[in-house]
Amino acid sequence: MTKRKQQPRKLRAVTDAEIDQVLAESFPPPEPAGGLSLHDLFAQQTREILDNSDLDEEQKQSILVAMQCPCCGGGAGSFTFKLKPRR
């Protein structure tokens, strides 16, 4: 018994409005920053990500050393993060 070839699906044209709608549903706009600068937001988001990760302190430190702020290009010396003390 031979298998039948599947017919290729017919694709329909997609409008820009449909693409915009899907993107809007997939990527909701961020909440207002509440007057924080980009530098402060970057530091806050980094702190949240590192706090919620399962990385050890040495891995967190290496990430902090390699980071650069998107607004000012500042390196690790520009940021102060409180990390949990080693046990």
Image (cartoon, helix red, strand yellow):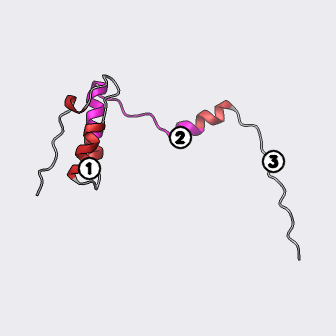
Q: Residue at 11%, 51% (x, y): give it.
A: 85
Question: In the displayed structure, does residue 54 sit left or right of residue 16?
Answer: left
Label 1: few (<14), some (14–19) or many (≥20) C-alpha neighbours in 10 Å: few
Question: In the displayed structure, does residue 85 sit left or right of residue 8?
Answer: left
Whether residue 18 is in magenta: the answer is: no
Quarter of the picture containing the N terminus is bottom right
Question: Tag 3, which secondary structure?
Answer: loop
Inter-mark Cα distance, 1 to 2: 35 Å
Residue 40, picture quadrant: top left
Residue 27 x, y percent position in the rendering: 49, 39
Q: Say if mark 2 contacts mark 3, CB within 8 Å.
A: no
Quarter of the picture containing the C terminus is bottom left
Q: Give the residue number, with chain letter if any, for mark 2.
A: 25
**Vertical relation: 59 (above or below) 43:** below
> Disc 3 residue type?
Lys
Q: Residue at 85%, 62% (x, y): give it.
A: 5
Q: Give the residue number, with chain letter if any, for mark 1.
A: 59
Question: In the displayed structure, does residue 36 sit left or right of residue 26?
Answer: left
Q: Looking at the image, is mark 1 or mark 2 earlier in the sequence?
A: 2
Q: Looking at the image, is mark 1 or mark 3 earlier in the sequence?
A: 3
Label 3: few (<14), some (14–19) or many (≥20) C-alpha neighbours in 10 Å: few
Q: Give the residue number, with chain letter if any, for mark 3.
A: 10
Q: Which residues are magenta?
A: 22-46
Residue 69 x, y percent position in the rendering: 31, 29
The residue lying toward the viewer, choosing from 78 and 49, is 78
> Disc 1 residue type?
Gln
Residue 33 x, y percent position in the rendering: 32, 29
**Vertical relation: 46 (above or below) 72:** below
